[in-house]
Image: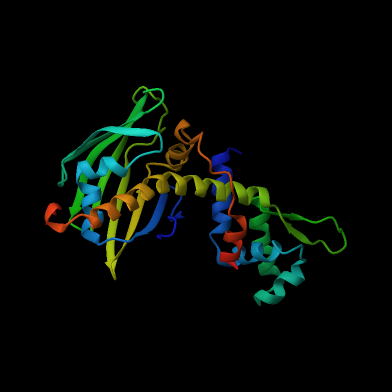
Amino acid sequence: MSSSERLDLTFAALADPTRRAILARLARGEATVTELAEPFELSQPAISKHLKVLERAGLVSMGVDAQRRPRKLEPKRLEEAVDWIDRYRDIFEQSYQRLDALLEELQATPPRRRRTRR
Amino acid sequence: MPRPAEVTLPSDRAVRVTRTFDAPRQLVWDAHTRPELVRRWQGYDGWDMPVCDMDVRVGGTYRWQWRNREDGKGFGFFGTFIEVDSPSKIVHEQYFDPGDFGGDMPAGDPCVVSVELSEKNGVTTLVCNLTFASKEAREAAVSTGMTDGMEHSYVRLDGMLSAAA
């Protein structure tokens, strides 16, 4: 799988609010399907379906306890996705921080010296 | 102090950037449409913008070029304005000009860049929508060498998860 395809899977998995909530729960520690189903008021099959999407995207994996079969967060893939978003943000922020300074300067300039096109 | 830009992905070939500015909309508009102002902020750390030609009207063209202060290499963008609605919306088609810096936008051109401005209580909200020709082009836009030296490695994992909770 290319990194582009992997990102697609990750972002598609993250596009759903329930799945993001499941990840937020798993960020606090491992949890079984039953434990996950409880706070979300969802059926276990519904949770399992979401977990399957998260597992396919590499965001969640099975913990070591074979009996309880807890799920755990795989932070690496999530970091990749956040990192990608951060790059975009940083590219824009470089310019926007300069724009902040320019706008401040323009507002400090007496209005008559400012040409404004209408 | 304005908060950092918020980046979302409305579709698999789009990026939306939202940012507020402590200034009236007309000024933010001017800063986007008057070349002598544009060249003072638009670009990248360590790069100058020697070429900033803009004919801001529907069908008018523009050309932006940056030059690296260290090695003198350049690249840019050029294109055509397809919607100009002062002072609230400007849309242009953007083509990548690799110059002598290199890099490419595979299957990529043009990217449609839309900037919308709205003002409330003296604060202007800017929403920039970039719609790439393909998701590969969206990838390429951040993975060119341009971004290699940037420090972006800190991860806002906790913030993202607490926002999602």
| x then y, percent, for residue A69 | 82, 61
The quadrant the C terminus of chain B occupies is bottom right
Horizontal arrangement in the rendering, residue B72 relative to residue A31 (left or right): left
As displayed, is residue B88 above or below residue A98?
Answer: below
Horizontal arrangement in the rendering, residue B57 relative to residue B165 (left or right): left
| x then y, percent, for residue B148 | 51, 34
| x then y, percent, for residue B40 | 28, 42
Q: Residue at x 58, y 60 (%)?
A: B159
Q: Residue at x 40, y 47 (%)?
A: A92
| x then y, percent, for residue A10 | 58, 51
The quadrant the N terminus of chain B occupies is bottom left
Answer whether residue A42 is visible to the viewer in this image. no
Specify the quadrant of the image occupied by residue B117.
bottom left
The colour scheme of the drawn protein is rainbow
Q: Residue at x 29, y 71 (%)?
A: B121
Q: Nearer the viewer, residue A50 or A118?
A: A118
